[in-house]
């Protein structure tokens, strides 16, 4: 299997290399970035996407900016990094990993810790590298914990959006679970929601599963009830962009529909989430800002208009699945079951 890296630091020219996810699977294109402004645009335009990858990319946004700008002294450099931080925070509002990663950069590499600009830049780089490396280890731990939820010999999943190597630094969260099930020898089948309007399932998840050699069927989002009626589906598994303190889960639009259908068919519904996605400061679903995106995403597919000119479009990029539809949340520290309010708090404190 060829491994396409979603993100790579090129130290020789202080450049961040990102796989352009907006043109996959038709083209495999890497773009190099040397400014926080261009990285902010890449996040906004979904050249990179997926909550954990957005966070790590933003962290590197500060790093490239530190090498790009010319500051008179370390305090001026810190001001310029702060401006970049503000710019990066304004890109996508729902995935809490973005804010978490930028907060982590301040915690791991506070300017007060350094005397020179050179030291500060090296500190920012090392912090971003730490976040990137840790993401891979966390994903593998999530998958390891999830293995206890798998049936013995064969497993059939329904998966929504893309949560694989492309949505993370590597391995993936929900797709990492699927990948580990396959690696451990279970006969693995995945029904892949195409995930309108951006088609992350059709374009990205099928692409990843194909490279991993995992059997999968691409389905339209509305097919999940039919699939659950006519096939033995063991479980639904999704990633997420933010888990509120009460266990409500924000994820790609359509996740809540899938969860409701799963409950009606008595199919367990699991969420794979690193601790960085659990935000105890967000109390419940009404506290989560849902990103609204351009109507063109709905009226056009790959540049071809499919709806009448001027049609009104409502295009929320995410929905929130109420906690009562979620069987468990799988984290790197273990599996959290209801009551989520109490158990998420305990997990974060442990
Ligand atoms: C491990 S990725 C988890 C989520 O970020 C993923 O399910 C998702 O909703 C991605 O949305 P996207 O709009 O493609 O960034």
Image (cartoon, rainbow, N blue to C red):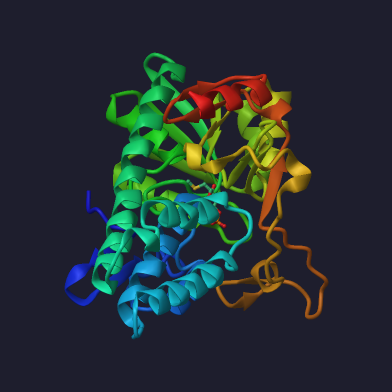
Give the x, y percent position of residue 318.
67, 52
Q: Residue 342: percent from the left, percent from the top? A: 65, 21
Query: As drawn, is 48 to the left or to the right of 254?
Result: left
Q: Is residue 214 above or below residue 28?
A: above
The reply to whether residue 28 is in sight is no
Q: Residue at x 30, y 69 (%)?
A: 17
Residue under the image location 68 percent in, 60 percent down: 291
Q: Is residue 149 left or right of residue 182?
A: right
Left or right of residue 167, residue 16 in this image: left
- Tell me: residue 216, above or below residue 288: above
How many numbered tags mark residues here? 0
For residue 35, above or below residue 17: below
Q: Nearer the viewer, residue 337 or 61?
A: 61
Q: Residue 102: x and y, percent?
A: 47, 58
Name which residue lies at 71% across and 54% down. Answer: 289
Outermost residue toward the top?
Answer: 152
Q: Position of residue 232 (x, y in %)?
A: 55, 22
Residue at image point 66% right, 57% down: 317
In this view of the protein, can residue 221 be seen by the observer? yes
Q: Residue 73 is drawn in which quadrant?
A: bottom left
């Amino acid at each position: 299997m060829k491994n396409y890296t979603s993100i790579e630091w090129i130290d020789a020219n202080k450049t961040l290399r990102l796989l352009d996810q907006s043109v996959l699977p038709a083209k495999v294109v890497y773009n190099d970035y040397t400014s926080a402004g261009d990285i902010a645009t890449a996040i906004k335009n979904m050249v990179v996407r997926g909550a954990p990858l957005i966070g790590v990319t933003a962290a590197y946004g500060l790093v490239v900016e530190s090498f790009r700008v010319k500051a008179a002294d370390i305090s001026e450099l810190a001001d310029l990094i702060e401006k970049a931080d503000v710019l990066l925070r304004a890109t996508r509002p729902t995935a809490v990993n973005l804010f978490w990663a930028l907060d982590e950069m301040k915690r791991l590499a506070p300017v007060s810790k350094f005397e020179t600009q050179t030291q500060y830049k090296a500190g920012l780089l090392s912090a971003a590298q730490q976040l990137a490396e840790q993401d891979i280890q966390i994903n593998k731990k999530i998958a390891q914990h999830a293995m206890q939820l798998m049936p013995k010999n064969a497993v059939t999943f329904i998966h929504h959006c893309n949560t694989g190597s492309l949505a993370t630094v590597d391995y993936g969260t929900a797709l990492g679970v699927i990948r580990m099930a396959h690696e451990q020898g279970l006969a693995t089948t995945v029904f892949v929601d195409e995930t309108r309007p951006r088609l992350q399932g059709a374009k990205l998840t099928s692409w990843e599963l194909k490279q991993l050699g995992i059997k999968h069927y691409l389905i339209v989002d509305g097919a999940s009830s039919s699939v659950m009626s006519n096939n033995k589906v063991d479980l639904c598994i999704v990633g997420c962009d933010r888990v509120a303190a009460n266990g409500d889960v924000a994820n790609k639009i359509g996740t809540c529909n899938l969860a409701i259908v799963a409950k009606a068919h008595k199919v367990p519904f699991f969420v794979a989430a690193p601790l960085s996605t659990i935000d105890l400061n967000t109390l419940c679903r009404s506290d989560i800002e849902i990103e609204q995106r351009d109507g063109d995403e709905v009226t056009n597919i790959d540049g071809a208009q499919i709806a009448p000119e001027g049609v009104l479009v409502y295009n929320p990029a995410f929905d929130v699945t109420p906690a009562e539809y979620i069987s468990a949340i799988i984290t790197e520290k273990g599996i959290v079951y209801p009551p989520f309010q109490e158990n998420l708090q305990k997990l974060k404190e442990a």
